[in-house]
C-alpha cells in the first residue's frame, strides 16, 4: 500500500482496535479473532452512501457513529453479542479535518458498542462507508425473523418515527410557525445521527424472543418481513406505538405523525415477538399480536408509510 494511505490508517484508525478477543488486528493481511467457545459467528454488513443515507452537511463524527450503530443494530436483532468490526472507507480526498472528526465518532462507537476496529480497506472515490460487524451467539440460539407464532405478542423498544422527523427537518420540510422548539429539534436530530443499537435487550431476546428484526425500513415494512419469514399475520394497534413527546410536538398533523412512526426507517429500534406467557419488562411496548394469516394489519390508513426502498 502507498505510504500516505498507511500513515492515514496509522494516524486515525490503528488505535481503535485491540481487546483480548483480537489476536491480530489492523496491520496484517487479515484480522484474527476469537469466537467464544461453543458459539457461532454472526456477520452483517451495512453501507452508507453520501446523498443516499446522509446529507453532505452531516458531521463526520455523526456519519461514523451512525454507520457503526446501523450495522451493529443487525447484530442486536439477531441476539448476537458484539465481537469486532471492519471498515471499508471510500473517500473523495484525504481531508485531515474530516478524518479527525470521523475517527472521533468511530472511537465513540467502538466504546459504546464494544466493537473494536479489526481492519478495513481505504480507497478513493465518492464518500461511502461500509461497516462489517462480527458477533456471536450460543449455537443455534440466533433470533431470526422466522420464529413468530400465532398467539405471540408483537413488541417494540424505544420510540418510533423520531429519525423520520429528523430527516424531514433536515430536508427543510417543516417550516414557518410549525417549526419545533430548538430543544426538540436537537433531540430528534440526535435520534437520527446517534442511533442506539439495542444490545441492552440481548439477554431478554435470547431468552424470550421468538422472532426479531431491527427497524431500518419502517415499522410496517419491517413487520412485513417478520410476517413473511414466519408465515403468519401481524396485527398492530396504532394507539399502542410508543411516540416521543418531541415527535408529538414536532408533527404538524396526526397523519404526518403516523407517517413518520409507521413508515420512517432509521430508528434502529427492535421489533420482536414474544410468547404469550412471558412477562413484558419496562421499556418494551406491546403494539400488537401474531395471528394466523399473512401480512400486516393496522387500525388506520397507511398511505405514505410504505418504507424506504432503493431502485424504486
Ligand atoms: P491489503 O492490501 O493486504 O488488503 P491494505 O493495504 O488494504 O491491506 O490494509 C493494510 C492494513 O490496514 C490491513 O490490516 C487493513 O485491515 C487495515 N486497514 C486498511 N484500511 C482500513 C480502515 N479504513 N480502517 C481500519 N483498518 C484499515
Ligand atoms: Mg494483503
Image: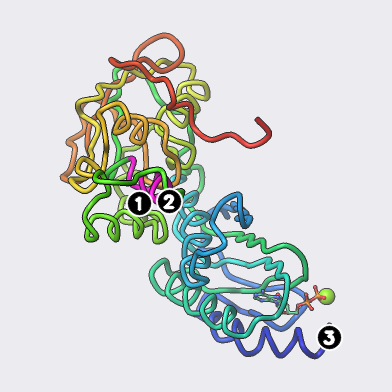
Magenta span of residues: 161-169
Q: Give the residue number, with chain letter if any, for mark 1.
A: 202
> What secondary structure is marked by label 1?
helix
Q: Residue at x 53, y 81 (%)?
A: 16
Q: Is residue 50 left or right of residue 263?
A: right
User: In the orientation shown, which residue stands out farthest toward the front?
Assistant: 176
Secondary element at image label 2: helix
Q: Quadrant of residue 258?
A: top left
Number of other residues with Cα within 10 Å of mark 1, as a class: few under 14, some 14 to 19, many 20 or more: some
Q: Is residue 249 above or below residue 35?
A: above
Residue 76's label in the rendered image is 2
What's the magenta bit mostly, secondary-structure-wise? helix
> Could you tell whether 209 is left or right of 48 in the image?
left
Residue 163 magenta = yes
The image shows residue 244, relative to residue 222, as above or below, that is below
Q: Nearer the viewer, mark 1 or mark 3?
A: 3
Q: Position of residue 161 (x, y in %)?
A: 34, 40
Which residue is situated farthest in the top direction here?
Answer: 293
Residue that badge 3 annotates: 2
> Residue at coordinates 31% horizontally, 50% vertically from top-left?
201
Mark 2–mark 1 contact, CB under 8 Å? yes
Instruction: Tell which of 192 and 13 is nearer to you.
Output: 192
The N terminus - image quarter: bottom right
In three-dimensional space, the C-alpha distance between marks 2 and 1, rounded to whole angstroms, equals 6 Å
Amino acid at each position: 500500500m502507498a505510504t500516505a494511505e498507511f500513515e492515514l490508517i496509522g494516524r486515525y484508525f490503528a488505535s481503535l482496535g485491540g481487546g483480548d478477543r483480537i489476536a491480530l488486528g489492523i496491520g496484517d493481511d487479515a484480522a484474527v479473532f476469537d469466537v467464544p467457545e461453543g458459539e457461532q459467528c454472526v456477520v452483517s454488513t451495512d453501507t452508507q452512501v453520501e446523498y443516499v443515507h446522509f446529507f453532505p452537511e452531516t458531521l463526520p463524527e455523526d456519519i461514523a457513529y451512525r454507520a457503526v450503530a446501523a450495522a451493529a443494530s443487525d447484530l442486536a436483532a439477531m441476539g448476537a453479542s458484539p465481537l469486532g468490526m471492519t471498515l471499508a472507507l471510500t473517500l473523495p480526498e484525504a481531508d485531515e479535518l474530516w478524518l479527525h472528526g470521523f475517527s472521533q465518532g468511530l472511537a465513540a462507537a467502538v466504546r459504546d458498542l464494544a466493537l473494536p476496529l479489526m481492519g478495513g480497506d481505504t480507497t478513493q472515490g465518492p464518500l461511502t462507508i461500509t461497516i462489517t460487524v462480527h458477533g456471536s451467539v450460543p449455537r443455534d440460539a440466533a433470533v431470526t425473523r422466522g420464529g413468530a407464532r400465532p398467539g405471540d405478542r408483537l413488541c417494540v423498544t424505544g420510540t418510533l418515527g423520531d429519525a423520520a422527523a429528523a430527516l424531514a427537518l433536515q430536508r427543510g420540510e417543516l417550516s414557518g410557525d410549525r417549526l419545533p422548539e430548538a430543544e426538540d429539534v436537537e433531540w430528534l436530530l440526535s435520534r437520527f445521527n446517534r442511533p442506539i443499537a439495542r444490545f441492552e435487550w440481548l439477554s431478554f431476546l435470547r431468552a424470550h424472543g421468538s422472532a426479531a428484526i431491527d427497524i431500518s425500513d419502517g415499522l410496517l415494512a419491517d413487520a412485513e418481513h417478520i410476517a413473511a419469514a414466519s408465515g403468519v399475520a401481524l396485527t398492530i394497534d396504532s394507539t399502542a406505538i410508543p411516540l416521543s413527546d418531541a415527535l408529538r410536538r414536532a408533527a404538524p398533523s396526526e397523519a404526518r405523525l403516523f407517517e413518520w412512526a409507521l413508515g420512517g426507517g432509521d430508528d434502529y429500534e427492535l421489533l420482536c415477538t414474544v410468547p404469550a406467557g412471558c412477562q413484558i419488562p419496562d421499556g418494551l411496548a406491546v403494539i400488537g399480536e401474531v395471528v394466523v394469516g399473512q401480512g400486516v394489519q393496522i387500525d388506520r390508513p397507511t398511505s405514505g408509510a410504505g418504507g424506504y426502498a432503493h431502485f424504486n
